[in-house]
Amino acid sequence: MISTNVNSYKTKSGKTVTVREASVQDAERMLIAASKALVEAPYMLSTVEDIEKVTLEDMKGLLEFYSQNPNYVKFVAEVENKLVGAIDFRNGDKEKIAHQGSFAMTVLPEYRNNGIGKALVESLITWARNNDQIEKICLEVMEENYGAINLYKSMNFVEEGRKMKAVKIENGYQDLILMALFV
């Protein structure tokens, strides 16, 4: 299934980035891109080792699962037909929290700070505003990921709280900042 939900944006360097819903046919490219995106990603919760545990069949199954749930979505970003980023969103799995959900995003290192993340988040916000169930988009971001925090603030996400020492890293801990946007 190829989605008709396609958005085009210009990167800071003037290239066109296309953001569209992911399909099962993207599974292999998504796994390859995810492992590359996590190599130089100190602020990501997932690691290359985590991705290496995911099989192609696992990814296909996950993409199929997302395509069947109207309150889940995965978008991919492509520049010149190269998959350069992805974002996924899931709403709460219980009735009382089904109006809100969280997202995670990755962008290849060589494409960061070029507008790809903003394009992915804008696509997610547009999708959420057109979804009758979703009212709130949430995220968690490491406290020292200043670029991401500034991006989210520029898009009107607000800080809701903090999980103290939520992430253990080599030289200590990072708090997770909880942010949200009502759509």
Image: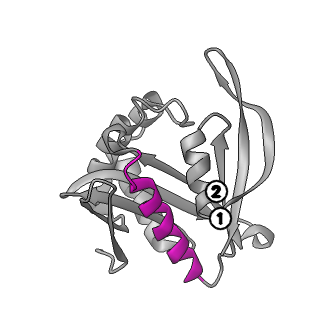
Disc 1: which residue: 156
Whether the residues at callouts 1 and 2 have beta carbons within 8 Å, the answer is: yes
The image shows residue 67 at horizontal and vertical percentages of: 44, 70
- Along the line of sight, the residue nearer the viewer: 30 or 145: 145
The image shows residue 55 at horizontal and vertical percentages of: 36, 41
Farthest residue in the front direction?
Answer: 13
Disc 2: which residue: 153
Q: Mark 2 is on which residue type?
A: Lys
- Along the line of sight, the residue nearer the viewer: 178 or 45: 178
Identify the magenta region: 113-131
Judge from the rendering whether residue 37 lies leftward or rightward of residue 182; answer left or right.
Answer: left
131 up-or-down from 124: above or below = below
Quick one: label 1, few (<14), some, or many (20+) residues within 10 Å? Answer: few
Is any atom of residue 70 visible in this view? no
Judge from the rendering whether residue 101 lies leftward or rightward of residue 50; answer left or right.
Answer: right
Q: Mark 1 is on which residue type?
A: Asn
Judge from the rendering whether residue 113 lies leftward or rightward of residue 126; answer left or right.
Answer: left
Figure quadrant of the N terminus: bottom left
